[in-house]
Amino acid sequence: MLLPLLLATELAAQTPVVPPIRELAPGVQLQPGGFEGERGPDGNTIIFDAPDGLVVVDTGRHSWHSDAILAYARERGRPIAAIVNTHWHLDHSSGNGRLKAVYPNARVYTTSAVDRVIAPGGFLVRNMDSARQMLVGTEITPVQREEVQIFLDTMVDSQVLRPDVVIEHSQRMRLGGRRFDVHVTNGAVTDADVWLYDRRTRIAVIGDLVTFPAPFFETACPQRWREALDEVWSTPFQIAIAGHGEPMTRDQFNVWRTAYGVFVDCVSSEREPAICGSGWAQATAQFNGDEAGQRRAAGFAGYYVTMLRNNGGKSADCLTN
Ligand SMILES: [Zn+2]
């Protein structure tokens, strides 16, 4: 009897603490995503009050993140009416199933980009093979093993990543009875990302169109991404909430946007990857923290120069340009 109890205590101690939920504007809450040690990140979740219930934008990766969303809904005594996935990356969508298990009437809104990556040969399906190999190997730590297993468990029921309502193009539409300007990119971080502009609060929810310490180009179309950043900039937003990290002012967003353009031009040039990388780190210095943070940003960006150049200036999964 004693041993299982001890084990349970140990496991409980390992469950990461979720950052507290906080109000950004009346009727708009931010559940920040965590990013701890060897674990994969959880994306930020933004929750809007709507006439029919709550509109939840992105659902995180881990059960403790989706549990925090569910606890908030319970505390408010309001159902989750709609779920929006900004994109199919699993740190933003793995919680869909857990939310729908409690609120089966919640509709998932996103683009059909996810269909390609869960089909045979698609990005996520390809990753399953290497994930299974990692589990067979002995080099990974228990926490890394748990993370790999979370990925594989999500893929067992990958249908929960698919939209109930496909968003095909940018439009003004009601989600849970609340109006949003819903934007769809034509290839940016993924084939088709969703971002929202809320006129009432002048908040833009932009998913991974901004990431730190560098843009993550694994599934990206760099030129289309640049156009999407310009489109965000053309709205009169006051606060941009990216998929990770703190809310940004217009000035901060513009610093990142400008640095992005310079970086992508550098990728297209003949300059050394390390030059493009340190240029990126300098331009985004205000987000990178100390010297180690600067080096990390330069390292990430430099890595992507090589990756993108090896694929003709885009990711292998980019269908457009
Ligand atoms: Zn993300």
Image: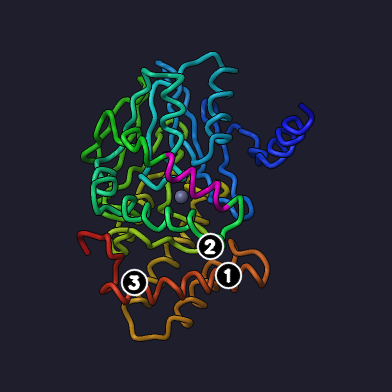
* Quadrant (top left, top right, bottom left, bottom right) of the N terminus: top right
Q: Which residue is mark 2?
A: 213
What residue lies at 26% left-to-right and 29% top-to-bottom?
Answer: 165
Q: Residue at x 34, y 75 (%)?
A: 265
Give, as a three-letter code, the residue at label 2: Pro
- Give left or right: position of 112 versus 151: left
Q: Is residue 32 above or below residue 48?
A: below
Amino acid residing under circle 1: Arg
Q: Which of pointers 3 and 2 indicates the residue nearer the eye?
A: 3
The answer to whether residue 200 is magenta is no
- The kind of secondary structure element at disc 3 is helix
What residue would you read off at disc 1?
A: 296
| SS at badge 2 | loop
The residue at 35%/31% (across/down) is: 180
Q: Is the residue under label 1 in contact with that under label 3 (CB below 8 Å)? A: no
Magenta-colored span: 144-153
Q: Quadrant of residue 123?
A: bottom left
